Image (spheres, rainbow, N blue to C red):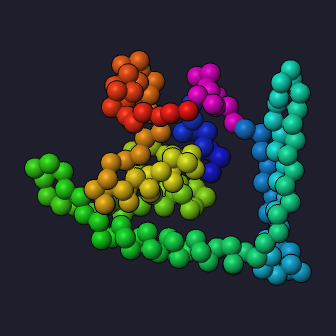
């Protein structure tokens, strides 16, 4: 998972031509029979803050593993079933279905799996928006775009001001 994350983010993890930067991480998973189905996780995150200071975030989490996974499995089945029904037609082409590797399921899985040659998206928000925009397209709605470029250009702002409702204070 970490290698995919590094490979898909050349801005955050640069390369000097011969070696690729990697985050400093260590993962240890141990089976403890006494806790049965409970999942216990202890995560510690370090970050650098203003003027070279350090920030440490320590999280202890305990939950029932099967109860945590059950809703995800149901959602995976529902999205797979929905995607099996969706057919897309390119202009002048024939209807077709999604690639058998459903990369949109990455939102609910640890390591995104994509068809060969497809970029890997590890950003949780982007993965969620992919599903949301796919469902919007099924309803004939345009995709949501959070860039809001029309509000960042002087001409666009002026046009919105003329067409939009008048607000009073």
Name the residue: 45% across, 74% down.
78
- Depicted 166 relative to depicted 40: above or below: above
Question: Residue 13's image quarter?
Answer: top right
- Depicted 138 relative to depicted 158: above or below: below
Q: Position of residue 138 (x, y in %)?
A: 31, 60
Q: Report if residue 28 is visible in the image.
A: yes
Magenta region, main secondary structure: loop
**Residue 17 lies within the magenta run:** yes
Q: In terms of depth relative to the viewer, which is nearer, 107 or 103?
A: 107
In the visual, does 101 lie left or right of 111? left
In the visual, does 139 lie left or right of 127? left
In the visual, does 67 lie left or right of 153? right
Quadrant of the image for the C terminus? top right
Q: Position of residue 110 (x, y in %)?
A: 61, 58
Name the residue: 44% across, 52% down.
130
In the visual, does 87 lie left or right of 125? left
- Depicted 33 relative to depicted 96: above or below: below
Write down the region rendered in magenta: 11-22
Q: Position of residue 93 (x, y in %)?
A: 13, 53
Q: In terms of depth relative to the viewer, which is nearer, 26 or 107?
A: 107
Name the residue: 61% across, 26% down.
15
Q: Position of residue 128 (x, y in %)?
A: 51, 54
Question: How many marks on residues?
Answer: 0
């Amino acid at each position: 998972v970490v290698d995919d994350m590094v490979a898909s983010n050349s801005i955050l993890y640069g390369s000097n031509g011969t070696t690729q930067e990697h985050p400093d991480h260590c993962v240890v998973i141990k089976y403890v029979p006494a806790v049965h189905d409970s999942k216990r996780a202890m995560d510690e995150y370090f970050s650098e803050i203003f003027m070279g200071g350090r920030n440490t975030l320590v999280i202890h989490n305990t939950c029932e593993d099967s109860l945590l996974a059950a809703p995800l499995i149901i959602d995976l089945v529902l999205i797979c079933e929905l995607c099996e029904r969706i057919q897309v037609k390119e202009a002048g082409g024939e209807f077709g279905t999604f690639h058998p590797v459903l990369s949109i399921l990455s939102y609910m899985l640890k390591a995104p799996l994509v068809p060969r040659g497809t970029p890997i998206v590890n950003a949780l928000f982007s993965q969620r928006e992919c599903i949301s925009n796919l469902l919007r397209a099924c309803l004939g709605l345009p995709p949501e775009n959070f860039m809001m470029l029309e509000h960042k250009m002087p001409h666009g702002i002026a046009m919105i001001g003329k067409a939009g409702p008048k607000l009073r204070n």
